Amino acid sequence: MGRGAARAPALRLLALGALLWPAAGAWELTILHTNDVHSRLEQTSEDSSKCVNASRCVGGVARLFTKVQQIRRTEPHVLLLDAGDQYQGTIWFTVYKGAEVAHFMNALRYDAMALGNHEFDNGVEGLIDPLLKEAKFPILSANIKAKGPLASQISGLYLPYKILSVGDEVVGIVGYTSKETPVLSNPGRNLVFEDEITALQPEVDKLKTLNVNKIIALGHSGFEMDKLIAQKVKGVDIVVGGHSNTFLYTGTPPSREVPAGKYPFIVTSDDGRKVPVVQAYAFGKYLGCLKVEFDEKGNVIASHGNPILLNSSILEDPSIKADINKWRIKLDNYSTQELGKTVVYLDGSTQSCRFKECNMGNLICDAMINNNIRHPDEVSWNHVSMCILNGGAIRSPIDERNNGIQVVYDLSRKPGNRVVKLDVLCTQCRVPSYEPLQMDKTYKVVLPSFLANGGDGFQMIKDEALRHDSGDQDINVVSGYILKMKVIYPAVEGRIKFSAGSHCHGSFSLIFLSFLAVIIVLYQ
């Protein structure tokens, strides 16, 4: 055996050590990050629904606090960042309207947050008060520009960037938000959402002139935009993103999520730098944990880490848990509030909703369509074409007290070939009317996230969707619709029909209802 061969194992061991230990003179930063938490303040089941078996539940701010504090005690330079969409998703937001977000993010001592599209769900006023006024950490977005009287009202409440002191170093955090927010939420007409890359570059240049050489882009525009920012914006060293609920992981994933790539995902910038890009899935299930080494000039020389699954092996912090229980008292009274009245029987029975059209299903889809009417103009009265709801989403009827797609099925045909006629309510029209579905046209559809993820056997929805955006929680949409209408009387209107050759036997699990994603808006 030659001398070179004998030395090879030692050389490999030395190379591995170089990856694990900071280089001489290097400065290491630990970035803890969350995104798309969507009001999951309490622990949830693995699929982010209500926690049933505590031994198998995950997430929640009490458990998150425990892990963050553990890392803060062991690592010298730590930042805790959030990439947006803390708002919307559970009864917590329905009742507290963002006060809970400000309170518990303050308790966890977040260092910075980027604005997500759902932060505008209650309008600009619902963002200003409580979140912008109550947050004790900077809230960022470089590509949102206020105009008119709002400019002075909101001035200083959010920033394009913030310079943070971390030990003896400074780190610049620059924020961004999806430019599609006016379609996805309700920011009003006095906020302009600029192109992310165009808006970020001058802010990064400004940080450079202030001698900040370590810059993190923190934002909420989706993984594809995160990668473009890493590639195109000169001077950005790290991108921490959200919006697309992307799960990245190196190695064998610890739960059911399938990684979209390694963590961190490395992008080569146009000027030849290696830029780490990260997200941490959604719903507070994971805490992203990225360690980055910088040289004396602020260049990233190494990065590694993984999202940490916040499972039951991590104990919930007792003080935060007690605070959660205190805040929860108000939630227990929410279900007794009267929103409105129905003067007809809301038929949500299995026999009706899983085998034919039912008026309760029509009500739910009508509410979803109504919720998506945003700024009609001379061309379009709405931006969403149709609503799809599975019969299993309706669990029970509601007794009476003092809009659309039209589809014809022939159940005598083989599965997958039973639709004989399908008309869709037009959107690019001033007077809504039904028109035949065009196979070469892209439609926006609202539907539950269960269906969008391929539930009930509808894998083709997940496979064929061009993209999806998280919508509002279904209970908020329907209750808000009833509150606005006061009195409801949904009818069976012939939205679903069966041809003469049909024999309605067996389970009919999918119903097409109202009428107003293919581009998808998801309901959590």
Image (cartoon, helix red, strand yellow):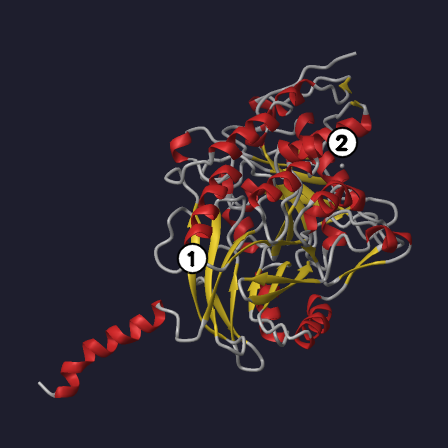
Quarter of the rendering containing residue 191:
bottom right
Residue 56, compared with residue 81, is above or below; it is above
Depth check, front residue: 430 or 496: 430
x%, y% of residue 478?
70, 31
The answer to whether residue 212 is left or right of residue 183 is left
Mark number displayed over residue 195: none
Q: Nearer the viewer, residue 39 or 455?
A: 39
Could you tell me if residue 88 is visible in this image?
Answer: no
- Measured as percent of width and height from the top left, residue 328 is found at 59, 26
Left or right: 355 with respect to 318? right
Q: Does any portion of residue 500 appear in the rendered image?
A: yes
Instruction: Check the image and name the residue furthest to the top.
Output: 402
Q: Position of residue 170 (x, y in %)?
A: 59, 67
Closer mark to the observer between disc 2 and disc 1: 1
67 left or right of 388 in image: left
Q: Residue at x 51, y 53 (%)?
A: 280
Give the residue pinned by disc 2: 481
In the picture as drawn, the residue positioned furthest to the left comes out as 1
What secondary structure is found at the residue carrying circle 1? Answer: strand
Residue 40 % position (x, y): 56, 38
Determine the residue positioned at 75% across, 13% down.
401
Classify mark 2: helix, strand or loop: helix
Q: CA distance from mark 2 to mark 1?
A: 41 Å
Dot placed on the residue nearer the N-terminal end, 2 or 1:
1
Residue position for label 1: 306
Q: Amino acid at mark 2?
A: Tyr
Q: Depth check: give the residue in front, 75 or 390.
A: 75
Above or below, 219 against 437 in this view is below
- Position of the C terminus, as image quadrant, is top right
| Crowding near the residue tagged with mark 1, few <14, some 14–19, many ≥20 C-alpha atoms within 10 Å | many
Q: Quadrant of the N terminus?
A: bottom left
